[in-house]
Amino acid sequence: MKIMMSKFLLLFLFLICCFAAEAQTPLSSRNRKAIALFEEGRKNYEYKRNDDAYKLLKKAVEEDNGFYEAYMILADVCNDLKKYSEAVIAYKSAISLQPDRFPKVYYTLAGVEMELNQFAEAKAHLDKMLTYSKLDPVARKKAERRLANATFSQTAISNPVPFAPQNMGDKVNSIYAEYHPSLTVDNNLLIFTRRRPSDAETDNGGSPVEEDFFVSARSGNEWSSALSLGPPINTNRNEGAHCISPDGRFFFFTGCDSPGGFGSCDIYFSEKKGRKWSTPINLGEIINSPKFDSQPTISADGRELVFTSSREGGKGSQDLWVSKKSADGKWQTPQNLGDSINTELEEKGAFLHPDGNTLFFSSSGHPGMGGSDIYYSKRKADGSWNKPKNLGYPINTKADEIHMIVSADSKTGYFASDRDSGLGLLDIYSFELYEAARPSSVTFLRGKVTDSKTGKPLEAQFEIIDVLSNETRVLSMSDPLTGEFLVTVPTGSSYALNVSAKGYTFFSENYKLGTKLKPTDVFDINIGLNPLATGEKIVLRNIFFESGSAELKKESAAELDKLFQFMTFNSTMKVEISGHTDDVGNDDANMKLSDSRAISVVNYLINKGILKDRLTSKGYGETQPIADNKTEEGKAKNRRTEFLIVGK
């Protein structure tokens, strides 16, 4: 963090000097040579000729070592020149001469001492400043905030967290500035912003320097040479501060001073169809305000958009806000993320991890190392957010840290830095995130949806539902041109996957995922949907019963409700619900159990509102196995519920 003289201190000193001249009140020095050097040095400082000011003011205090005003401005000059040790000496010299003349000097001195990691000294000087009863409220609050930062920094530096950043290399980074990375859930597509000279592709008379999006693809452990994302997203204006949805199909970004915008900067989105991106669309005045709206991050289920805004009603100059998508697909009025996240200063650079419950963001208002630090917060059961935790030193430093993202498996962080090991102005780095700060891990399903008869790619809806809570965790669509899909699956629970498309039967599968998945534990699945026709049969993988009973478990609700919706949408369809068992136990008992279970499903649908004459039930016991009963896996597959279309 650059510690520079604050505007109120500059103004105060200039007013003091002007008042002294007007009132013919002498300065603290009566040495004419020292005063002349001081006046010339002050004039050079005012005109930002700091090197000349430094030499003149050094001579002034050498001429008169009791010259308070000369020490004060010399200290400010040393501060600006990053001569921090000399600045400390000069401030302390001024304080020793007149300790109570200007209490706010303790604030500036403490800031310089923090640059030198002299935290005990900084805390002592801030404590001293806070003893002045006539200190104005703004200065008191700033001193309290700096004291909190000094206290945190002292502890953080004494207890560093593991951190070994690796430059992503010259395939991603260049001699220019690269920043704001985003990553698909499979870790195979990286999109970032590059600030570079304009080129013929996008420059139509705009600025000689522009911000554009670049993309690099991973193959094994290697990244491809980054290429421009190109039109229609890149233009001759600046595009930046973006995110890509975990499935790689939706791109949200910030455009400033764009035609038809609602404020200084607005949020736009583009959809990928096949290999092409659509023309960007402004998200509209529900999301965008007459103020500054930027830096979006989208949840894995596509139903939450968190972003930075300076709109009315916030806690500080920039806050984090969230808009949720309603059932009809419309974004709702954004809500402030609240006091646990937002402060009186700036919160920005949010990243909502695909686990849906971990938020990373930058803030200058929470206790930290100074400037903007990166924090993370976990979502509570009621949807609110826990008190943020600072990621610690040396991830956070005295510099401004902003916009870190974390891979879906929670192990790798990515960020931009101008550290000495870089190839250019700003480079993108990756590092292993220490375990205590990791979100819940997320794996993914990928594959393709086709018409089972023709092989034609289909646009289908995907739902990932937590069967324990009946909560939809992911809602997505396959690509309308290729049928390809990539959807996140949080670990640590049991999930129902439902895939549906208009005019087709739906697909059902169940996944039980542990918490200790390896990077290779991903799920590739190609899904063929059958056109609606009499005789089509579907296995309902997510209907569960109590052991040896026809009582439905609560985990069955998601699948049963999906079946209800399917029959409601296809309002003339008639179906047979059938129950099946493995070959364990008595044949007659198995037949009776399977029949009772089919009846339980029928009764559920009738109670939901499906007409009785559209439903029949039948138990088949162990007579129609679909797998070998010699293995536990085969037996599990044979214990199933099916529905058969018997009439359209």
Image (tube, helix red, strand yellow):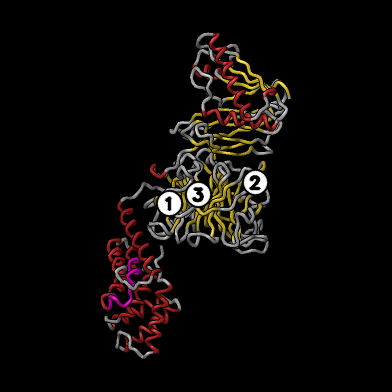
Residue 201 % position (x, y): 66, 56
Q: Residue 424: tell me if it is visible.
A: no
Q: Earlier in the sequence, mark 1 or mark 3?
A: 3
Amino acid type at circle 3 is Phe
Which numbered tag is attached to residue 375?
A: 1
Was residue 110 drawn as part of the magenta stretch in this picture? yes
Residue to which mark 3 is pinned:
351
Instruction: Report the number of numbered marks.
Output: 3
Residue range (magenta): 98-112
Residue 131 % position (x, y): 29, 69
Look at the numbered disc 2 and give the secondary structure of its residue. strand
Q: Residue at x 27, y 81 (%)?
A: 66
Look at the numbered disc 1 and give the secondary structure of its residue. strand
Q: Residue 255: tell me if it is visible.
A: yes
Q: Where the N terminus falls, by quadrant? A: bottom left
Q: Residue at x 53, y 56 (%)?
A: 308
Residue 27 % position (x, y): 33, 86
Which numbered tag is attached to residue 271?
A: 2
